[in-house]
Image (spheres, rainbow, N blue to C red):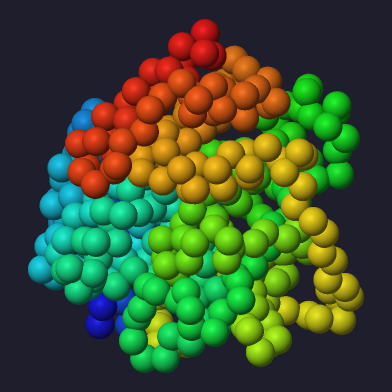
Amino acid sequence: MKAVALLGSTGSIGTSALSVLAQHTDKYNVYALTANRSVDKLFEQCQQFKPMFAVMLDESSAKQLSLKVKAAGLLIQVLSGVQALEEVVQHGEVDYVIAAIVGAAGLLPILAAAKSGKRILLANKEALVMSGQLLMREVETNGATLLPVDSEHNAIWQCLPVGESQQYQYENKGIRRIILTASGGPFRDYELSELENVTPEQAIAHPNWSMGEKISVDSATMMNKGLEVIEAHWLFGMSTKYIDVVLHRQSVIHSMVDYVDGSVLAQMGNPDMRTPIANALAWPNRIDSGVVPLDLVATGRLDFAKADHKHFPCLALAYEALEAGGTTTAILNAANEVAVAAFLSKRIKFTKIPVIIEQVLSKQTASSGDSLEQVFADDKEARSLANKYIN
Ligand code: NAD
Ligand code: MG
C-alpha cells in the first residue's frame, strides 16, 4: 500500500489522478488532498477519499472546509497556508507526491518533497522552469525520484533506455534528439492577422485536451511547448540543440526519441492524462488507467508539420531563455503567468502576451539562479515589470 499526497487535487490533473486512484484502492491510499480555495470540491473529495489531511492555501477557505468536515463527522485534519503544504508532503507516512498545483505556487511544496526523498509525480512544469537547477540538485542529493506526468515527458521517458534505475542524464547515450509533439492548440490554422482579436473563451477551448485555464492559454500561444522544452532539458539532461518540437494535430503520438541508429521510438495513446498519471504511479509496473484503448483505424492518419516560430513567438522566447540560462527561465515563467492572467481577465489582447514577456526579458537582468532567494527575487521583479507594461 502506497500513501499518496495529492497537491492541487481539485484541478484538471488532480481530478484525473483521483479517478485513477479510485480504481486501485487496494494499492494506493490518499493521505492528503490540497487546493487553493475550492471548498465545495475539496469537501466532496474528502467525503469520497477520507484523507488524513486536507490543506487549503487560503485560510478562510480552510475554516469553511473545517466546519463542513466536522459537521459530516469526518476525522480529517484541515490546515492552511503554504507551510502546511510543505509540511504535509514531508510526513514519514507519505510515499508518493503528485504535484498538480498550477504555476509558481507549486515550487516550494515540490522542493519539500524532494528534500524528504519522496517519489514525485510531476505535472507542475513551472517548478522546473523556475528553478530546474535547484530542484534537480535536491532530487539527486536526497535520493528522491522525479517521474514526469506531463504527457510529452512521460512519453519520452517511456521511450528512453531507463531500465530499472532512474537517471537524469541522457546526452551522449546514442540519442540524436528528442521530439516533443504539439497539437498547435485552437489557433493552429489561424492567419497571424486573425490572432489579434481572439477571446479567452476561444483560447481555452482546446481541440484535443481538456485542461485548466492557464495551461490552455499556454497551449494556444504554445508557451506550453516552450515550457516543456525547458522541462525536458532538466528532466533528461539534454541541451536545446537536442530538443525539437513538431506539430502533430491528432495528439496521438505524445512524443518521440530519435536514436543515432535511425530508430525513432514513439509513445502513443488517446489524449487522456490518466495514462501518464497511471504510468508514473505504477512504474515500473503497469496498471489500468480507465482510458479508452486507442483505435488506430478510427484514428486513420497521423499528420506532422513544422512548428513555426513566427506563428508561435512564445516558443522562440522559451528557447532563447533556456539558452540564456540562470534565472532567465524563471523571469520568462513569471512574465508569462502575469500576461496570461491579464489576457484571461480581458485586460490585454492575446497577441500582447509574447510582447509583454519579451519586454520583461529584455529589461530585466537575470542572475545565476543557484539560490532560492535569487529565483524568488527575480520572479517578483518580473511580475512587477510585467504588471507595469500591462498597465
Ligand atoms: P488547474 O487550474 O485545473 O488546477 C490547479 C490546482 O492547483 C487546483 O487544485 C487549485 O486549487 C490548485 N492551486 C491553484 N493555485 C494554487 C496556489 N497558489 N497554491 C496552492 N494550490 C493552488 O490546473 P491543471 O490544468 O490541473 O494543471 C496543473 C499543473 O499541471 C500545471 O502546472 C500544468 O502546467 C500541468 N499540466 C496540466 C495538464 C492538463 O492536462 N491539465 C497536462 C500537463 C501538465
Ligand atoms: Mg504537456
Q: On the rendered structure, is 45 left or right of 345? A: left
Q: Nearer the viewer, residue 80 or 43?
A: 80
Position of 205 relative to 183 (above/below): above
**Residue at image point 80% right, 45% down:** 188
**Which of the 4 quarters of the picture holds residue 46?**
bottom left
Q: Is residue 191 visible?
A: yes
Which quadrant of the view contains residue 346? Answer: top right
Mark count: 0
Tell me: 205 left or right of 227. Answer: right
Q: Residue sitting at 63 percent across and 39 percent down?
A: 314
Query: Could you say where residue 326 lies in the image, as x and y percent from the top left?
Result: 36, 44
Q: Nearer the viewer, residue 19 or 149?
A: 149
Residue at 63 percent of width and 44 percent of height = 315
Residue 377 x %, y %:
26, 29
Q: Position of residue 177 (x, y in %)?
A: 61, 71
Quarter holding the N terminus is: bottom left
Residue 225 vs residue 35, the one in the foreground: 225
Report whether 246 appears left or right of 58: right
Q: For the point 44% across and 53% down, which residue is it?
A: 125
Q: Is residue 70 toward the left or the right of residue 231 in the image?
A: left
